[in-house]
Amino acid sequence: MLPARVDVAALAVYGSPLLQVLAEPAPLQAGTGGEGLMAALARIALALQASDPARLRRQESWWGRLLGRDVARQAQAQGLQAQLGVLVLQAREQAQGLAQRVQQRAQTIIDNDAAAAALQAWATFGAAQLASLEGAAQVVLAPRVDHLQRLATLRRIESGQWQLLQAQDEALLQRFVRIHDVLLPAWRQAALAGQAQAQAAQVAQAAALQAQIDDEVAAAQARLP
Protein backbone atom coordinates (compact mmCIF):
# COMPACT_ATOMS: atom_id res chain seq x y z
CA MET A 1 0.00 0.00 0.00
CA LEU A 2 1.42 3.39 -0.97
CA PRO A 3 1.90 5.96 1.81
CA ALA A 4 -0.35 8.97 2.12
CA ARG A 5 0.98 12.33 1.00
CA VAL A 6 -0.03 14.20 4.16
CA ASP A 7 3.24 13.58 6.03
CA VAL A 8 6.19 14.18 3.74
CA ALA A 9 8.75 13.14 6.34
CA ALA A 10 6.97 9.82 6.82
CA LEU A 11 6.68 9.43 3.07
CA ALA A 12 10.42 9.94 2.67
CA VAL A 13 11.26 7.05 5.01
CA TYR A 14 8.20 4.88 4.46
CA GLY A 15 8.96 1.19 4.04
CA SER A 16 12.69 1.55 4.67
CA PRO A 17 13.16 -2.05 5.95
CA LEU A 18 11.35 -3.42 2.89
CA LEU A 19 13.32 -1.17 0.58
CA GLN A 20 16.58 -2.43 2.08
CA VAL A 21 15.56 -5.99 1.25
CA LEU A 22 14.52 -5.05 -2.27
CA ALA A 23 17.70 -3.04 -2.78
CA GLU A 24 19.83 -6.15 -2.28
CA PRO A 25 20.37 -7.66 -5.75
CA ALA A 26 19.50 -11.31 -6.08
CA PRO A 27 22.73 -13.26 -6.61
CA LEU A 28 23.59 -13.45 -10.31
CA GLN A 29 24.60 -16.97 -11.21
CA ALA A 30 28.17 -17.17 -12.43
CA GLY A 31 28.57 -17.98 -16.10
CA THR A 32 25.70 -19.34 -18.10
CA GLY A 33 25.37 -22.52 -16.07
CA GLY A 34 25.85 -24.55 -19.25
CA GLU A 35 29.62 -25.01 -19.17
CA GLY A 36 29.35 -28.56 -17.81
CA LEU A 37 26.88 -29.63 -20.48
CA MET A 38 28.92 -27.92 -23.17
CA ALA A 39 32.06 -29.80 -22.08
CA ALA A 40 30.14 -33.10 -22.03
CA LEU A 41 28.84 -32.54 -25.57
CA ALA A 42 32.34 -31.62 -26.76
CA ARG A 43 33.67 -34.92 -25.40
CA ILE A 44 30.92 -36.82 -27.21
CA ALA A 45 31.72 -35.00 -30.45
CA LEU A 46 35.40 -35.88 -30.10
CA ALA A 47 34.58 -39.51 -29.32
CA LEU A 48 32.61 -39.81 -32.56
CA GLN A 49 35.61 -38.58 -34.52
CA ALA A 50 37.72 -41.56 -33.45
CA SER A 51 36.61 -43.41 -36.58
CA ASP A 52 37.59 -40.49 -38.83
CA PRO A 53 41.34 -39.80 -38.40
CA ALA A 54 41.40 -37.71 -41.57
CA ARG A 55 38.90 -35.28 -40.05
CA LEU A 56 41.01 -34.98 -36.92
CA ARG A 57 44.09 -34.24 -39.02
CA ARG A 58 42.25 -31.51 -40.92
CA GLN A 59 41.34 -29.85 -37.63
CA GLU A 60 45.01 -29.45 -36.72
CA SER A 61 47.32 -26.88 -38.22
CA TRP A 62 50.39 -27.87 -40.19
CA TRP A 63 52.49 -27.14 -37.13
CA GLY A 64 50.16 -29.18 -34.93
CA ARG A 65 50.47 -32.16 -37.25
CA LEU A 66 54.23 -31.78 -37.26
CA LEU A 67 54.19 -31.92 -33.46
CA GLY A 68 51.96 -34.97 -33.53
CA ARG A 69 48.97 -33.28 -31.97
CA ASP A 70 46.64 -35.01 -34.41
CA VAL A 71 47.98 -38.38 -33.25
CA ALA A 72 47.47 -37.43 -29.61
CA ARG A 73 43.96 -36.21 -30.37
CA GLN A 74 43.20 -39.45 -32.22
CA ALA A 75 44.30 -41.44 -29.17
CA GLN A 76 42.14 -39.24 -26.95
CA ALA A 77 39.16 -39.70 -29.26
CA GLN A 78 39.57 -43.49 -29.27
CA GLY A 79 39.70 -43.52 -25.48
CA LEU A 80 36.55 -41.42 -25.27
CA GLN A 81 34.69 -43.54 -27.83
CA ALA A 82 35.25 -46.58 -25.63
CA GLN A 83 33.38 -44.67 -22.90
CA LEU A 84 30.64 -43.25 -25.13
CA GLY A 85 27.85 -44.65 -22.98
CA VAL A 86 29.30 -43.00 -19.88
CA LEU A 87 29.77 -39.73 -21.76
CA VAL A 88 26.12 -39.73 -22.81
CA LEU A 89 25.04 -40.39 -19.22
CA GLN A 90 27.21 -37.51 -18.01
CA ALA A 91 25.71 -35.19 -20.61
CA ARG A 92 22.21 -36.26 -19.58
CA GLU A 93 22.96 -35.49 -15.93
CA GLN A 94 24.40 -32.10 -16.86
CA ALA A 95 21.31 -31.33 -18.93
CA GLN A 96 19.01 -32.24 -16.06
CA GLY A 97 20.91 -29.96 -13.70
CA LEU A 98 20.87 -27.14 -16.22
CA ALA A 99 17.13 -27.55 -16.78
CA GLN A 100 16.57 -27.17 -13.04
CA ARG A 101 18.68 -24.00 -12.95
CA VAL A 102 16.74 -22.61 -15.91
CA GLN A 103 13.48 -23.25 -14.07
CA GLN A 104 14.78 -21.60 -10.89
CA ARG A 105 16.07 -18.61 -12.83
CA ALA A 106 12.71 -18.20 -14.53
CA GLN A 107 11.06 -17.76 -11.12
CA THR A 108 13.82 -15.35 -10.09
CA ILE A 109 13.11 -13.25 -13.18
CA ILE A 110 9.41 -13.14 -12.29
CA ASP A 111 10.19 -12.08 -8.71
CA ASN A 112 12.70 -9.50 -9.90
CA ASP A 113 10.24 -7.98 -12.36
CA ALA A 114 7.63 -7.77 -9.59
CA ALA A 115 10.12 -5.97 -7.33
CA ALA A 116 10.99 -3.55 -10.14
CA ALA A 117 7.31 -2.81 -10.72
CA ALA A 118 6.70 -2.15 -7.01
CA LEU A 119 9.71 0.13 -6.74
CA GLN A 120 8.67 2.03 -9.85
CA ALA A 121 5.13 2.43 -8.49
CA TRP A 122 6.49 3.96 -5.30
CA ALA A 123 8.76 6.25 -7.28
CA THR A 124 5.95 7.32 -9.60
CA PHE A 125 3.65 8.07 -6.67
CA GLY A 126 6.31 10.14 -4.92
CA ALA A 127 7.21 12.02 -8.09
CA ALA A 128 3.56 12.94 -8.58
CA GLN A 129 3.57 14.70 -5.20
CA LEU A 130 6.68 16.81 -5.77
CA ALA A 131 5.06 19.54 -7.86
CA SER A 132 2.40 20.21 -5.21
CA LEU A 133 4.85 20.40 -2.30
CA GLU A 134 6.75 23.36 -0.94
CA GLY A 135 10.50 23.64 -1.39
CA ALA A 136 11.49 22.19 1.99
CA ALA A 137 9.13 19.26 1.53
CA GLN A 138 10.49 18.62 -1.96
CA VAL A 139 14.02 18.49 -0.54
CA VAL A 140 12.88 15.74 1.84
CA LEU A 141 11.00 13.67 -0.72
CA ALA A 142 13.07 14.10 -3.90
CA PRO A 143 16.06 11.94 -2.78
CA ARG A 144 13.74 9.04 -1.94
CA VAL A 145 12.01 9.29 -5.31
CA ASP A 146 15.39 9.28 -7.05
CA HIS A 147 16.53 6.31 -4.95
CA LEU A 148 13.42 4.31 -5.79
CA GLN A 149 13.81 5.04 -9.49
CA ARG A 150 17.44 3.91 -9.41
CA LEU A 151 16.52 0.68 -7.65
CA ALA A 152 13.76 -0.02 -10.16
CA THR A 153 16.21 0.57 -13.02
CA LEU A 154 18.75 -1.75 -11.40
CA ARG A 155 16.17 -4.49 -11.11
CA ARG A 156 15.20 -4.13 -14.76
CA ILE A 157 18.86 -4.33 -15.81
CA GLU A 158 19.31 -7.49 -13.72
CA SER A 159 16.25 -9.05 -15.33
CA GLY A 160 17.68 -8.28 -18.75
CA GLN A 161 20.95 -10.01 -17.84
CA TRP A 162 19.14 -13.07 -16.54
CA GLN A 163 16.96 -13.24 -19.64
CA LEU A 164 20.09 -13.33 -21.81
CA LEU A 165 21.49 -16.20 -19.74
CA GLN A 166 18.10 -17.89 -19.93
CA ALA A 167 18.07 -17.69 -23.72
CA GLN A 168 21.61 -19.12 -23.94
CA ASP A 169 20.84 -22.04 -21.64
CA GLU A 170 17.52 -22.81 -23.32
CA ALA A 171 19.24 -22.87 -26.73
CA LEU A 172 21.91 -25.21 -25.35
CA LEU A 173 19.27 -27.54 -23.94
CA GLN A 174 17.54 -27.62 -27.32
CA ARG A 175 20.82 -28.58 -28.99
CA PHE A 176 21.36 -31.30 -26.39
CA VAL A 177 17.91 -32.75 -27.12
CA ARG A 178 18.62 -32.75 -30.86
CA ILE A 179 21.99 -34.46 -30.37
CA HIS A 180 20.79 -36.92 -27.71
CA ASP A 181 17.40 -37.84 -29.15
CA VAL A 182 17.95 -37.57 -32.91
CA LEU A 183 21.52 -37.31 -34.18
CA LEU A 184 23.33 -39.67 -31.81
CA PRO A 185 20.90 -42.61 -32.19
CA ALA A 186 20.94 -42.13 -35.96
CA TRP A 187 24.76 -42.05 -35.94
CA ARG A 188 24.90 -45.26 -33.91
CA GLN A 189 22.53 -47.01 -36.28
CA ALA A 190 24.46 -45.86 -39.34
CA ALA A 191 27.80 -46.76 -37.76
CA LEU A 192 26.62 -50.26 -36.86
CA ALA A 193 25.19 -50.78 -40.32
CA GLY A 194 28.44 -49.62 -41.85
CA GLN A 195 30.44 -52.04 -39.71
CA ALA A 196 28.17 -54.95 -40.56
CA GLN A 197 27.77 -54.30 -44.26
CA ALA A 198 30.73 -52.07 -45.08
CA GLN A 199 28.59 -50.19 -47.56
CA ALA A 200 29.71 -46.77 -48.66
CA ALA A 201 26.22 -45.27 -48.25
CA GLN A 202 25.99 -46.19 -44.56
CA VAL A 203 29.53 -45.02 -43.88
CA ALA A 204 28.78 -41.72 -45.58
CA GLN A 205 25.56 -41.36 -43.59
CA ALA A 206 27.42 -41.91 -40.31
CA ALA A 207 29.99 -39.32 -41.34
CA ALA A 208 27.26 -36.84 -42.23
CA LEU A 209 25.54 -37.34 -38.88
CA GLN A 210 28.85 -36.96 -37.11
CA ALA A 211 29.39 -33.67 -38.94
CA GLN A 212 25.93 -32.49 -37.85
CA ILE A 213 26.75 -33.26 -34.22
CA ASP A 214 30.04 -31.38 -34.57
CA ASP A 215 28.14 -28.42 -36.02
CA GLU A 216 25.63 -28.44 -33.17
CA VAL A 217 28.42 -28.46 -30.57
CA ALA A 218 30.36 -25.74 -32.39
CA ALA A 219 27.25 -23.56 -32.62
CA ALA A 220 26.59 -24.02 -28.91
CA GLN A 221 30.20 -23.14 -28.06
CA ALA A 222 29.93 -19.99 -30.15
CA ARG A 223 27.05 -18.75 -27.95
CA LEU A 224 29.12 -18.95 -24.77
CA PRO A 225 30.72 -15.67 -23.65
Image (cartoon, rainbow, N blue to C red):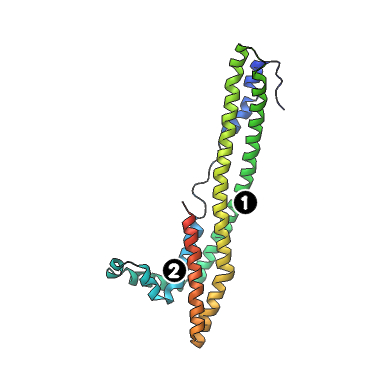
Q: Earlier in the sequence, mark 2 or mark 1?
A: 2
Rendered image: mark on residue 20: none
Q: Is residue 213 left or right of residue 156?
A: left
User: In the current view of this chain or complex, which residue is farthest to the front?
Assistant: 131
Quarter placement of the N terminus? top right
Foreground pick, 69 / 204: 204
Residue type highlighted by circle 2: Leu
Cβ atoms under marks 2 and 1 closer than 8 Å? no
Task: Find numbered disc 2 in the image and state the secondary structure of the residue it sits on.
Answer: helix
Crowding at mark 1 (Cα within 10 Å: few <14, some 14-19, many 20+): few
| Residue located 48% across and 84% down the image | 200
| Residue located 30% across and 66% down the image | 64
| Residue located 53% across and 63% down the image | 91
Decide: is 176 above or below 210. above
Q: Position of residue 10 (x, y in %)?
A: 66, 18
Q: What residue does disc 1 label?
A: 103
| Residue located 45% across and 70% down the image | 47
Q: Position of residue 40 (x, y in %)?
A: 49, 62
Task: Find numbered disc 1 in the image and state the secondary structure of the residue it sits on.
Answer: helix
Foreground pick, 101 / 8: 8
Whether residue 75 is visible to the viewer of this picture, yes or no, is no
Mark 2 vs mark 1, CA separation in Å: 30 Å
Decide: is 89 above or below 8. below
Whether residue 95 is visible to the viewer of this picture, yes or no, is yes
Q: Which picture quadrant has residue 79?
A: bottom left
User: In the current view of this chain or complex, which residue is farthest to the bottom?
Assistant: 197
Q: Position of residue 112 (x, y in %)?
A: 62, 39
Q: What residue does disc 2 label?
A: 46
